[in-house]
């Protein structure tokens, strides 16, 4: 599989500004690597997702939702919707961990408790 850099991925995503121009992962992979079009390539999709995380950690406004796919935020509202989606997903994971360990969510990370 060919390699792609964060800058190259950002260039491809610059063609997808706004939720109405979102692109799902399979189509995004095919746009990056046309030779992979029409086939399922989990390793390529995983690499793209890893680069998207890296770009977000650099502060790029890369949005995503299962209904729209990936895109660069066109408005503050689109960015806020993605942040809320990511927050809800993170909270769901933390709630599952707390339940499996049979501890409260605040106790999960050892938050400060005052003596009672």
Image: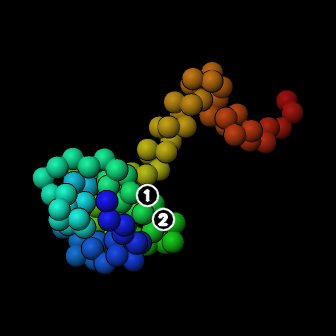
Q: Which residue is mark 1?
A: 50
Residue 99 vertical placement versus 1 (above, below): above
User: Mark on residue 54?
Assistant: 2
Is 105 on the left or on the right of 60, as rendered? right
Which image quadrant is residue 111 in? Answer: top right
Question: Quick one: SS at disc 2?
Answer: helix
Give the residue displayed 27% in from the left and 74% down from the top. 12
Is 95 on the left or on the right of 63, as rendered? right
**Closer to the camera, 36 or 89?**
36
Q: Quadrant of the C terminus?
A: top right
Judging from the image, the colouring scheme is rainbow
Residue 37 vertical placement versus 108 (above, below): below
Gap in angstroms between the C-alphas marked 1 and 2? 6 Å
Residue 92: x and y, percent?
47, 37
Residue 104: x and y, percent?
64, 29
Q: Quadrant of the N terminus?
A: bottom left
**Closer to the camera, 89 or 39?**
39
Residue 56 vertical placement versus 96 (above, below): below
Which image quadrant is residue 53 in? Answer: bottom left
Give the residue displayed 19% in from the left and 57% down from the top. 36
**Closer to the camera, 36 or 85?**
36
Residue 84: x and y, percent?
42, 54
Question: Quick one: SS at disc 1?
Answer: helix
The answer to whether marks 1 and 2 mark residues whose Cβ atoms lie closer than 8 Å is yes
Give the residue displayed 25% in from the left and 67% down from the top. 32
Is 101 on the left or on the right of 52, as rendered? right
Give the residue displayed 63% in from the left and 21% down from the top. 102
For the residue carrying disc 1, how many other residues have a C-alpha within 10 Å: few (<14), some (14-19), or many (20+)? few
Outermost front residue: 1
């Amino acid at each position: 599989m060919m390699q792609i850099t964060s800058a190259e991925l950002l260039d491809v995503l610059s063609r997808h500004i706004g939720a109405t121009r979102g692109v799902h992962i399979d189509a995004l992979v095919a746009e990056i690597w046309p030779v992979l079009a029409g086939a399922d390539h989990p390793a390529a999709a995983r690499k793209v997702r890893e680069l998207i995380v890296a770009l977000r950690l650099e502060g790029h406004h890369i949005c995503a939702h299962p209904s729209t796919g990936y895109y660069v935020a066109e408005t503050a509202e689109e960015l806020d919707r993605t942040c809320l989606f990511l927050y809800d997903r993170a909270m769901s994971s933390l709630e599952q961990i707390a339940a499996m360990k049979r501890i409260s969510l605040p106790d999960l990370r050892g938050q400060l408790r005052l003596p009672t």
